[in-house]
Image (cartoon, rainbow, N blue to C red):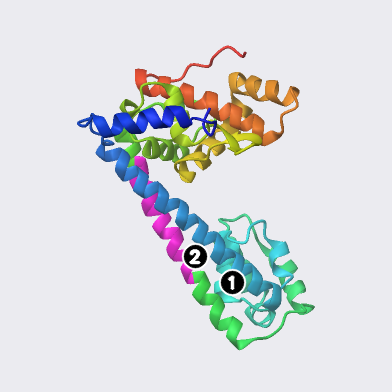
Amino acid sequence: MRGSKTDNIDSVLIANALRFEGDKPQQVSPKHSEELCHLTRLRADMVKDRTRVALRVTSLLDRMFPELLCSFSKTLSPSCLALLSQAPTPTRVLALGEERLTTLLYHASRGKLGVTRAREIINKAAVSIGVNSQALEEILPLLLEQIDLIGSQLTTLDHRISELYDQAGLYFTSIAGVGTLTAVTILGEFGSVERFKQAQQMVAFAGVDPKLRDSGQHRGQVHISKRGSRYLRRALYLACRGVVRKDDYFNAIYQHHRDNGKCYKEAIVAVMNRFIHVIYAIWRDNRPYYPLTPV
């Protein structure tokens, strides 16, 4: 187990490393895998950036028009963004009028919102406790431009990522609950199945293997090692949250660990371990996933 006392073993390994040279070179990932790794990591960072900007928009609206967000299910919904670009303050909403506001919401929501929502927003604007601030009104359009720019860049990235995944010709998405973005992240981070002789090496590469945290006389608890890419672990985590809902085999593994007293995250980590073994078999044999018999 990683983290256990291995002083004697380490000394032998160090001695052999000094004695021998010319080991096999590390295998290089295929070109499409390396490109997917760069693209998916950039995409994950850009989504975080968009979320950060959206939180700033919410913070501004809490001061300028705190009642507005209750009228929309999402802060970044097209209807909300369209309204903020035209009338971000109660005063501007009232100046816009019911007819123009109805038309704006109708087109932005593709016909889902209309006069009822427009009247609701106007009524809220009439009694709003928002603070008028010229500086905040100047900052908000800049933040909205950032959100729009990141959104268009994400669309371009998603298109390119889908193209590369189709070229790879793999069957990760044949597992119910695994989406394309999750599959391409897993592909890009692992690189190539030929780098691993067995599935347990992929488990260790992902940092999902157990690690014993000992120090001197102290005997710590066992946790996952968390070595390697955090992008990979997040993709595996999201994938396993989906498969436990849609696949009986993985759901049985999850329920088994929950019944044995494991918390949610511990059970999901156990599913991640088995999920990597399944991914390894699919990748090695280049075949689709067929639902397995529940354990």
> Camera-side residue: 75 or 18?
18
The answer to whether 286 is drawn above or below residue 183 in the figure is: above
Q: Residue at x 36, y 44 (%)?
A: 37
Q: Secondary structure at mark 1?
A: helix
> Camera-side residue: 217 or 63?
217
Please state which amino acid type lies under the numbered disc 1: Leu
Instruction: Look at discs 2 and 1 and give the one toward the viewer.
Output: 2
Q: CA distance from mark 2 to mark 1?
A: 12 Å
Q: Assess disc 2: are there few (<14), some (14-19) or many (≥20) residues with their C-alpha within 10 Å of its C-alpha.
A: many
The secondary structure making up most of the magenta span is: helix
Left or right of residue 116: residue 2: left
Q: Secondary structure at mark 2?
A: helix
* Rendered-image quadrant of the C terminus: top right
Q: Assess disc 1: are there few (<14), some (14-19) or many (≥20) residues with their C-alpha within 10 Å of its C-alpha.
A: some
Image coordinates of residue 211 in percent, x first then y, are 56, 33
Please state which amino acid type lies under the numbered disc 2: Ile
Q: Is residue 176 visible?
A: no
Q: Which residue is mark 1?
A: 84
Asked which quadrant contains residue 257, the reply is top right
Lower position in the chain sequence, tag 2 or tag 1: 1
Left or right of residue 176: residue 164: left
Left or right of residue 273: residue 158: left
Q: Residue at x 32, y 38 (%)?
A: 33
Read off the magenta span: 145-162
Q: Is residue 154 visible?
A: yes
Q: Which residue is mark 2?
A: 147
